[in-house]
Image (cartoon, rainbow, N blue to C red):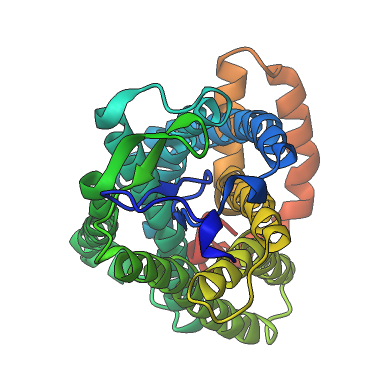
Amino acid sequence: MDNSTQPPVQEMTEAYYNYDDFETDFSIAQPCRPIVVEKFVRIFVPILYSLVLLLGALGNMLVILILGRYKRARRTITDTFILHLAIADVLLAFTLPFWAVEAVRGWVFGTVMCKLIGTIFALNLYSSILFLVCISFDRYLAIVHAIHMYRKRKPIYIHVTCLIVWALCLLLAMIDLIFREEYRSTYLNSTVCIYMFHPDSAGAWKLAIRVAHHTIGFFVPMVAMLYCYCMIFKTLCHAQMFERQKTLKVVIVIVVVFIICWLPYNTVLFVDTLQSLGTIGTSCTMFNTLDISRTITQTLGLIHSCLNPLLYAFIGVRFRHEMVRVLVGIGCLKKKLVVSRHAGKSKRASSAISDSETSTSHSTIW
């Protein structure tokens, strides 16, 4: 691109926060961002983020409510990880209205809220993904190695693990707390919440943030989950029980949903990183396409927080029974209807009771 079209160098590097957690260098002249992109963002982001907020908050708050009813003696390791996962997803969802408002009116909440919301978003985005890894590893130990008794003997290890996950994610989110600022952009003609780095170190910081996201936020969790679930799949393929065959389907769904939700976003982000490094050519069409693609694919990734309750909680038999009791208690379901349906299923389930000790030890989520 002709240097004559470049904006003057600012005292601090301006970065446009394109409703994801990572910045795009401000190196594009006004003609490279047509009105159609602005209109798309202002319409798409509020609608989709509102939907994610509604589904994610309701689903995960129901998970927290039901798991909170479990006594400590009844709560398994998987339940503990699911509880932390639901908390992370709820907090992540509650940051979305702020980004939706920014898409329409610009950032109107001030610098303090910019730092706070950016930090909460990053903290819970990372922790949500890492708790999925914890659940996968827990299933791997319980099914592949048949390690069950460690749940009762050493519960402190589980709390320490959760604490380490939160601490690691908080460390990663400190970048947002330190470097996010409210900034009036003449290029966007709007106030935005962005990273503000010194020009001498802006490139290095951006690359570090992208590498951290690609590795800790996607590739390492994906490899860990694939390994754990492949080993689980291999182990369960030798089992002939009905419950185990249902688990095979669940394993496939968990892996496929995670990849479908997060692979597109990380692919687009990786292409954007290569473009920023000058590895691939740039053009106005490429810039605009990446702008729209980042917005769409990150929303797809955020939808995963809505699916987590369905994948990791609602498919569990004990959890479903507890959920029905809650719905009956608040009057959403009639008790007679629930009792009659339960009686109809009791005969079909009786053949599996003889092996119930083995199946329940594998977890409540299967």
**Image quarter of the N terminus:** bottom right
Q: Residue at x 70, y 72 (%)?
A: 248
**Image quarter of the C terminus:** bottom right
Is residue 217 shown above or below 87?
Answer: below
Q: From the viewer's side, name the closer residue of 145 and 165.
A: 165
- Percent from the top left, x then y, of residue 45? 63, 35
Q: Quadrant of residue 163?
A: bottom left
Confirm whether residue 172 shows in the render: yes
- Percent from the top left, x then y, of residue 155? 23, 60
> In the image as oriented, which residue stretches furthest toward the front?
4
Q: Residue at x 59, y 45 (%)?
A: 30
Q: From the viewer's side, name the closer residue of 283 and 264.
A: 283
Q: Quadrant of residue 220?
A: bottom left
Q: From the viewer's side, name the closer residue of 190 and 211.
A: 190
Q: Residue at x 57, y 27 (%)?
A: 325
Confirm whether residue 75 shows in the render: no
Is residue 182 shown above or below 232?
Answer: above
- Percent from the top left, x then y, of residue 19? 52, 43
Is residue 143 shown above or below 98?
Answer: below
Q: From the viewer's side, name the closer residue of 119 and 343.
A: 119
- Percent from the top left, x then y, of residue 264? 66, 64
